[in-house]
């Protein structure tokens, strides 16, 4: 029999467990968003569809990452993690574009957001893998791109357009802004825990985080951010349709 079938998950393997729960949660969220499409106002259908695509892409990656983690005896599926993020984070940028489009959100703004998110992720990937010995430098560049996104959503074009669109869009954008500011800040924490030297030279042990695992932190972050983001968009689609 292939070793695949002999794989058992130890009860205290929390990493594998969070990959499993992550798969289930992302699948359930996708089913929910896709089924709700039929009762979603036409103007909001693309937004809710994108919410479902984000969780669906994550579900497929989580299924794969759980297997990778088990079959390699606990290795981090770093490559597939970043492939997932490179697909889903730009889609989150698309959500900002779609909800601000009515009052002038342009594809130029969309590309600005996507560009910043790609810089944030590619430099983070460099720091975690190829240029691991320069993880501080790459972490700082990634952090700068991250703060640029925070700026755009809280004070820049996204915030201004959202306010001009409608009170409901302004409110939803503020909530999404909290996800970007607090929810996304979970990821640099995972980077610090999983990368020697971490971010800004901070060390996991010095921060009292040495007992934590990078994948568990990333898995928790993904569940909060991908499903949470989708639900904010879903709620907005309901409050805006009569
Ligand atoms: C669904 C996946 C999401 C929302 C992923 C977001 C990822 C980040 C905000 C990652 C940020 C990072 C930094 C700000 C610095 C260190 C390197 C990263 C890539 C972990």
Image (cartoon, helix red, strand yellow):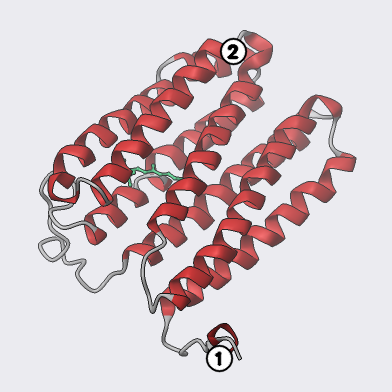
The disc placed on residue 56 is none
Q: Nearer the viewer, residue 57 or 131?
A: 131
Q: Nearer the viewer, residue 41 or 146?
A: 146
The answer to whether the residue bearing label 2 lies less than 8 angstroms from the nearest atom of ligand 1 is no
Query: Taking the image as four quarters, which one is ligand 1 found in?
Result: top left
Image quarter in which the C terminus is found? top right
Q: Nearer the viewer, mark 1 or mark 2?
A: 1
Which residue occupies 31% across, 56% down? Answer: 190
Q: Is residue 103 above or below residue 162?
A: above
Say whether marks 1 and 2 touch (CB < 8 Å): no
The disc placed on residue 6 is 1
The reply, left or right, for residue 43 in relation to residue 209 is right
Looking at this view, name the residue that lies furthest to the top. Answer: 104
> In the figure, residue 115 lies in which quadrant?
top left
Which residue occupies 53% across, 29% down? Answer: 93
* Number of residue marks: 2
Q: Secondary structure at mark 1?
A: helix
Q: Nearer the viewer, residue 77 or 150?
A: 77
Image coordinates of residue 192 in percent, x first then y, are 22, 54
Q: Is residue 63 above or below residue 57?
A: below
The answer to whether the residue bearing label 1 lies less than 8 angstroms from the nearest atom of ligand 1 is no
Q: Residues within 10 Å of mark 1 (few under 14, many from 20)?
A: few
Image coordinates of residue 87 in percent, x first then y, are 54, 40
- Nearer-N-terminus badge (1/2): 1
The reply, left or right, for residue 164 in relation to residue 214 is right
Which residue occupies 23% across, 32% down? Answer: 141
Q: Where is mark 2, residue-wise?
A: 105
The reply, left or right, for residue 124 in relation to residue 33 is left
Q: Secondary structure at mark 2?
A: loop
């Amino acid at each position: 029999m292939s070793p695949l079938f002999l794989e058992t998950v130890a009860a205290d393997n929390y990493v594998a467990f969070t990959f499993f729960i992550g798969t289930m949660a992302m699948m359930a969220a996708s089913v929910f968003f896709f089924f709700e499409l039929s009762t979603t106002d036409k103007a909001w259908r693309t937004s809710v569809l994108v919410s479902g695509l984000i969780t669906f892409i994550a579900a497929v990656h989580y299924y794969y990452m759980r297997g990778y983690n088990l079959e390699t005896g606990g290795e981090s599926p770093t490559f597939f993690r970043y492939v997932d993020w490179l697909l889903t984070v730009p889609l989150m940028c698309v959500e900002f574009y779609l909800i601000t489009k009515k009052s002038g959100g342009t594809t130029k703004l969309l590309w600005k957001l996507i560009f910043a998110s790609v810089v944030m992720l590619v430099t983070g990937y460099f720091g975690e893998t190829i240029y691991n010995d320069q993880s501080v430098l790459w972490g700082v560049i990634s952090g700068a791109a991250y703060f640029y996104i925070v700026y755009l959503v809280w004070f820049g074009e996204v915030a201004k357009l959202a306010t001009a669109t409608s009170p409901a869009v302004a409110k939803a954008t503020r909530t999404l802004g909290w996800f970007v500011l607090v929810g996304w800040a979970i990821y640099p924490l995972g980077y610090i825990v999983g990368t020697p030297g971490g971010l800004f030279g901070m060390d996991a042990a010095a921060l009292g985080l040495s007992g934590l695992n990078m994948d568990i932190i990333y898995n928790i972050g993904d569940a909060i951010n991908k499903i949470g983001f989708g639900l904010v968009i879903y709620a907005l689609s309901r409050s805006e349709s009569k």
